[in-house]
Amino acid sequence: MTSAQPNFQVPFPCGQTWSGNKASSAHTSWEIDFSRAGAAADLGDTVVAAAAGTVVTSANQGAVNGFGNLIKIDHGGGWTTFYAHLRVLSVRAGTHVSAGQKIGEVGNTTKPGASLAAHLHYEVRTSGAYPANVQKAVFNGVPFGYPKQSVTSKNCGGSSGGGGGSTNPYTPEKICGSGYTVIDSAAVGSVGKAYLLYNKANGKNCVTTVKSTSLGKASAVSAYLEVQGKTRVTDAGNFDYYAGPVAAAGAKKCIKWGGKIGSAVYNSLLEHCG
Protein backbone atom coordinates (compact mmCIF):
# COMPACT_ATOMS: atom_id res chain seq x y z
CA MET A 1 0.00 0.00 0.00
CA THR A 2 1.36 3.43 -0.95
CA SER A 3 1.77 5.92 1.91
CA ALA A 4 1.50 9.71 1.76
CA GLN A 5 3.82 11.28 -0.79
CA PRO A 6 7.16 12.53 0.58
CA ASN A 7 7.78 16.27 0.46
CA PHE A 8 9.67 16.14 -2.83
CA GLN A 9 11.82 19.09 -3.86
CA VAL A 10 13.14 20.28 -7.23
CA PRO A 11 16.10 17.97 -8.10
CA PHE A 12 18.61 20.82 -8.41
CA PRO A 13 20.58 22.91 -5.88
CA CYS A 14 18.87 25.56 -3.79
CA GLY A 15 17.89 28.73 -5.64
CA GLN A 16 18.39 27.43 -9.18
CA THR A 17 15.52 27.91 -11.67
CA TRP A 18 14.92 25.22 -14.29
CA SER A 19 12.35 24.84 -17.04
CA GLY A 20 10.41 21.59 -16.99
CA ASN A 21 8.57 20.26 -20.03
CA LYS A 22 6.41 17.17 -20.44
CA ALA A 23 5.86 17.67 -24.16
CA SER A 24 8.13 14.97 -25.57
CA SER A 25 7.30 12.16 -27.95
CA ALA A 26 9.17 9.82 -25.59
CA HIS A 27 6.80 10.60 -22.71
CA THR A 28 3.79 8.44 -21.97
CA SER A 29 2.72 9.89 -18.63
CA TRP A 30 3.86 12.60 -16.15
CA GLU A 31 7.60 12.50 -16.85
CA ILE A 32 9.45 15.84 -16.97
CA ASP A 33 12.51 16.91 -18.98
CA PHE A 34 14.44 19.70 -17.25
CA SER A 35 16.74 22.20 -18.97
CA ARG A 36 18.02 25.63 -18.07
CA ALA A 37 20.59 27.45 -20.21
CA GLY A 38 20.64 25.12 -23.22
CA ALA A 39 22.08 21.68 -23.88
CA ALA A 40 25.76 22.66 -24.01
CA ALA A 41 25.54 24.86 -20.91
CA ASP A 42 23.47 22.38 -18.89
CA LEU A 43 25.89 19.50 -19.45
CA GLY A 44 27.61 18.70 -16.15
CA ASP A 45 25.26 20.70 -13.90
CA THR A 46 24.62 19.17 -10.47
CA VAL A 47 21.57 16.95 -9.90
CA VAL A 48 20.44 16.37 -6.31
CA ALA A 49 18.06 13.99 -4.54
CA ALA A 50 14.46 15.23 -4.46
CA ALA A 51 14.00 13.67 -1.00
CA ALA A 52 15.88 11.43 1.39
CA GLY A 53 16.02 7.75 0.51
CA THR A 54 18.12 4.77 -0.55
CA VAL A 55 19.69 4.43 -3.98
CA VAL A 56 18.45 1.20 -5.56
CA THR A 57 19.85 1.72 -9.07
CA SER A 58 23.03 3.50 -10.12
CA ALA A 59 24.00 2.14 -13.53
CA ASN A 60 23.84 2.63 -17.27
CA GLN A 61 20.43 1.46 -18.46
CA GLY A 62 20.77 2.63 -22.06
CA ALA A 63 20.50 -0.78 -23.65
CA VAL A 64 17.52 -1.66 -21.43
CA ASN A 65 15.27 1.39 -21.62
CA GLY A 66 17.19 4.30 -23.13
CA PHE A 67 17.64 6.04 -19.80
CA GLY A 68 21.43 6.00 -20.11
CA ASN A 69 23.07 6.59 -16.74
CA LEU A 70 20.20 6.24 -14.28
CA ILE A 71 19.79 6.89 -10.56
CA LYS A 72 16.68 5.43 -8.92
CA ILE A 73 15.94 6.29 -5.28
CA ASP A 74 13.52 4.45 -2.99
CA HIS A 75 11.91 6.92 -0.57
CA GLY A 76 9.85 4.37 1.33
CA GLY A 77 6.11 3.93 1.43
CA GLY A 78 6.04 2.79 -2.20
CA TRP A 79 7.56 6.01 -3.67
CA THR A 80 10.57 6.15 -5.99
CA THR A 81 12.19 8.85 -8.12
CA PHE A 82 14.14 8.43 -11.38
CA TYR A 83 16.96 10.67 -12.68
CA ALA A 84 17.97 9.72 -16.23
CA HIS A 85 20.54 10.55 -18.95
CA LEU A 86 23.14 11.57 -16.33
CA ARG A 87 26.71 12.26 -17.39
CA VAL A 88 28.11 11.22 -14.02
CA LEU A 89 26.77 8.83 -11.35
CA SER A 90 27.92 10.24 -7.98
CA VAL A 91 26.38 7.65 -5.62
CA ARG A 92 26.31 3.86 -5.56
CA ALA A 93 23.38 1.48 -5.14
CA GLY A 94 22.73 0.86 -1.46
CA THR A 95 23.76 4.37 -0.41
CA HIS A 96 21.40 6.40 1.80
CA VAL A 97 21.11 9.96 0.49
CA SER A 98 19.72 13.12 2.05
CA ALA A 99 17.44 15.63 0.36
CA GLY A 100 19.61 18.03 -1.62
CA GLN A 101 22.62 15.68 -1.75
CA LYS A 102 24.42 15.50 -5.09
CA ILE A 103 23.67 12.25 -6.89
CA GLY A 104 24.94 12.99 -10.40
CA GLU A 105 25.35 15.49 -13.21
CA VAL A 106 23.12 16.48 -16.13
CA GLY A 107 24.11 14.50 -19.22
CA ASN A 108 23.04 13.11 -22.57
CA THR A 109 23.56 9.36 -22.15
CA THR A 110 20.93 7.17 -23.82
CA LYS A 111 20.62 4.12 -26.09
CA PRO A 112 23.83 2.80 -27.69
CA GLY A 113 24.39 4.60 -31.00
CA ALA A 114 21.73 7.25 -30.33
CA SER A 115 22.25 10.95 -29.65
CA LEU A 116 20.45 13.21 -27.19
CA ALA A 117 20.61 16.85 -26.07
CA ALA A 118 21.75 17.23 -22.48
CA HIS A 119 18.87 17.43 -19.98
CA LEU A 120 17.54 15.72 -16.86
CA HIS A 121 14.65 13.29 -17.30
CA TYR A 122 12.79 13.11 -13.96
CA GLU A 123 9.98 10.82 -12.81
CA VAL A 124 8.05 10.02 -9.65
CA ARG A 125 6.64 6.50 -9.48
CA THR A 126 4.65 4.29 -7.14
CA SER A 127 4.39 0.51 -7.24
CA GLY A 128 2.46 -1.03 -10.10
CA ALA A 129 2.72 -1.32 -13.86
CA TYR A 130 4.37 1.34 -16.04
CA PRO A 131 3.21 3.88 -17.18
CA ALA A 132 0.16 3.96 -14.89
CA ASN A 133 2.45 4.11 -11.86
CA VAL A 134 4.08 7.40 -12.96
CA GLN A 135 2.70 10.15 -10.75
CA LYS A 136 2.29 13.88 -11.24
CA ALA A 137 5.31 15.71 -9.83
CA VAL A 138 4.84 17.88 -6.74
CA PHE A 139 7.64 20.15 -5.51
CA ASN A 140 7.62 21.52 -1.96
CA GLY A 141 3.89 20.83 -1.75
CA VAL A 142 3.04 22.59 -5.02
CA PRO A 143 1.94 20.49 -8.04
CA PHE A 144 4.00 21.01 -11.19
CA GLY A 145 2.17 23.13 -13.78
CA TYR A 146 1.90 20.65 -16.64
CA PRO A 147 2.66 20.60 -19.50
CA LYS A 148 5.52 23.02 -18.75
CA GLN A 149 6.64 25.38 -16.03
CA SER A 150 9.76 27.06 -14.68
CA VAL A 151 10.41 26.10 -11.06
CA THR A 152 12.88 27.47 -8.52
CA SER A 153 14.52 24.96 -6.19
CA LYS A 154 13.90 25.12 -2.47
CA ASN A 155 15.99 21.96 -2.09
CA CYS A 156 18.26 23.66 0.41
CA GLY A 157 19.41 20.79 2.58
CA GLY A 158 17.15 18.83 4.88
CA SER A 159 13.94 20.46 3.69
CA SER A 160 12.44 17.15 2.64
CA GLY A 161 13.34 15.25 5.72
CA GLY A 162 10.75 16.72 8.03
CA GLY A 163 13.45 17.82 10.42
CA GLY A 164 13.92 21.23 11.86
CA GLY A 165 16.07 23.26 14.19
CA SER A 166 16.03 26.49 16.12
CA THR A 167 17.71 28.60 13.43
CA ASN A 168 16.71 29.02 9.80
CA PRO A 169 19.83 28.18 7.76
CA TYR A 170 18.74 30.25 4.75
CA THR A 171 19.61 33.93 4.57
CA PRO A 172 17.73 36.34 2.29
CA GLU A 173 20.95 36.91 0.32
CA LYS A 174 21.33 33.18 -0.28
CA ILE A 175 17.69 32.87 -1.33
CA CYS A 176 17.71 35.81 -3.79
CA GLY A 177 21.18 35.04 -5.12
CA SER A 178 24.44 36.73 -5.97
CA GLY A 179 24.45 40.52 -6.17
CA TYR A 180 21.38 41.13 -3.99
CA THR A 181 21.65 43.20 -0.79
CA VAL A 182 19.00 43.65 1.90
CA ILE A 183 17.61 47.21 1.85
CA ASP A 184 14.59 46.70 4.12
CA SER A 185 12.96 44.10 6.36
CA ALA A 186 9.85 43.79 8.49
CA ALA A 187 8.56 41.34 11.08
CA VAL A 188 5.76 39.03 10.02
CA GLY A 189 4.09 38.71 13.40
CA SER A 190 6.39 36.74 15.68
CA VAL A 191 6.97 33.89 13.21
CA GLY A 192 9.42 35.34 10.69
CA LYS A 193 10.45 38.27 8.54
CA ALA A 194 9.87 39.64 5.07
CA TYR A 195 12.97 40.97 3.31
CA LEU A 196 13.37 43.40 0.43
CA LEU A 197 16.65 43.20 -1.51
CA TYR A 198 18.09 45.10 -4.45
CA ASN A 199 20.66 44.23 -7.11
CA LYS A 200 22.43 47.28 -8.53
CA ALA A 201 23.82 45.30 -11.44
CA ASN A 202 20.45 44.36 -12.95
CA GLY A 203 18.14 46.96 -11.35
CA LYS A 204 15.91 44.28 -9.82
CA ASN A 205 14.29 44.02 -6.40
CA CYS A 206 13.79 40.65 -4.73
CA VAL A 207 11.44 39.68 -1.88
CA THR A 208 11.54 36.62 0.35
CA THR A 209 9.59 35.71 3.48
CA VAL A 210 11.72 33.70 5.92
CA LYS A 211 10.27 31.60 8.73
CA SER A 212 11.66 31.59 12.27
CA THR A 213 9.33 28.90 13.66
CA SER A 214 8.10 25.48 12.47
CA LEU A 215 11.38 25.09 10.60
CA GLY A 216 11.63 22.04 8.39
CA LYS A 217 7.86 21.58 8.48
CA ALA A 218 5.65 22.62 5.57
CA SER A 219 3.35 25.51 6.44
CA ALA A 220 1.61 28.32 4.56
CA VAL A 221 4.08 31.04 3.52
CA SER A 222 3.96 33.69 0.80
CA ALA A 223 6.04 36.56 -0.56
CA TYR A 224 5.07 39.23 -3.08
CA LEU A 225 6.54 42.16 -4.99
CA GLU A 226 4.50 44.74 -6.87
CA VAL A 227 6.22 47.36 -9.01
CA GLN A 228 4.06 50.44 -9.54
CA GLY A 229 2.00 50.06 -12.70
CA LYS A 230 2.77 46.36 -13.10
CA THR A 231 1.19 43.07 -12.04
CA ARG A 232 2.05 41.75 -8.60
CA VAL A 233 4.43 38.77 -8.52
CA THR A 234 3.70 36.23 -5.77
CA ASP A 235 5.13 32.96 -4.51
CA ALA A 236 2.77 31.11 -2.16
CA GLY A 237 2.51 27.56 -0.88
CA ASN A 238 3.30 25.21 1.97
CA PHE A 239 7.03 25.66 2.48
CA ASP A 240 9.56 24.40 5.03
CA TYR A 241 11.78 27.46 5.42
CA TYR A 242 10.81 30.39 3.19
CA ALA A 243 8.71 31.71 0.30
CA GLY A 244 10.23 33.33 -2.76
CA PRO A 245 12.38 34.55 -4.21
CA VAL A 246 10.18 36.86 -6.28
CA ALA A 247 12.08 39.41 -8.35
CA ALA A 248 11.22 42.21 -10.76
CA ALA A 249 12.86 45.26 -12.26
CA GLY A 250 12.08 48.18 -9.96
CA ALA A 251 14.68 50.86 -10.69
CA LYS A 252 13.19 54.39 -10.50
CA LYS A 253 9.79 52.90 -9.59
CA CYS A 254 7.80 52.78 -6.35
CA ILE A 255 7.04 49.31 -5.03
CA LYS A 256 4.83 47.43 -2.60
CA TRP A 257 6.17 44.29 -1.00
CA GLY A 258 5.46 41.90 1.84
CA GLY A 259 4.58 38.42 2.89
CA LYS A 260 2.51 36.12 5.03
CA ILE A 261 3.26 33.22 7.39
CA GLY A 262 0.14 31.42 8.55
CA SER A 263 -2.24 34.21 9.56
CA ALA A 264 0.51 36.76 10.26
CA VAL A 265 0.93 39.35 7.49
CA TYR A 266 3.18 42.25 6.54
CA ASN A 267 2.15 44.62 3.74
CA SER A 268 4.29 47.65 2.90
CA LEU A 269 3.12 51.03 1.72
CA LEU A 270 4.03 52.24 -1.76
CA GLU A 271 7.68 53.06 -1.09
CA HIS A 272 11.36 52.81 -2.09
CA CYS A 273 10.74 55.08 -5.07
CA GLY A 274 14.41 55.32 -6.05
Image: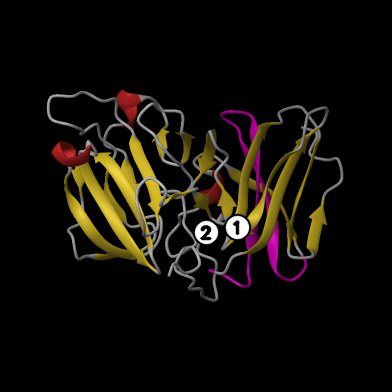
The Cα–Cα distance between marks 1 and 2, rounded to whole angstroms, is 8 Å
Q: Would you say residue 267 sits in the magenta stretch?
A: no
Note whether 65 is above or below 175 in the view shown: above
Q: Position of residue 142 (x, y in %)?
A: 59, 51
Q: Left or right: 112 with respect to 124?
A: left
Quick one: which residue is furthest to the front in this view? Answer: 129
Task: Classify the position of the C terminus by image quarter.
Answer: top right
Of the two numbered discs 1 and 2 on the same chain, state the one appearing first in sequence: 2
Amino acid found under the numbered disc labelled 1: Tyr
Residue bearing the label numbered 2: 170
What are the residue bounds of the magenta stretch?
189-216
Q: Position of residue 169 (x, y in %)?
A: 50, 64
Q: Position of residue 202 (x, y in %)?
A: 58, 28
Residue bearing the label numbered 1: 242
Note whether 63 is above or below 241 in the view shown: above
Q: Left or right: 191 with respect to 34?
A: right
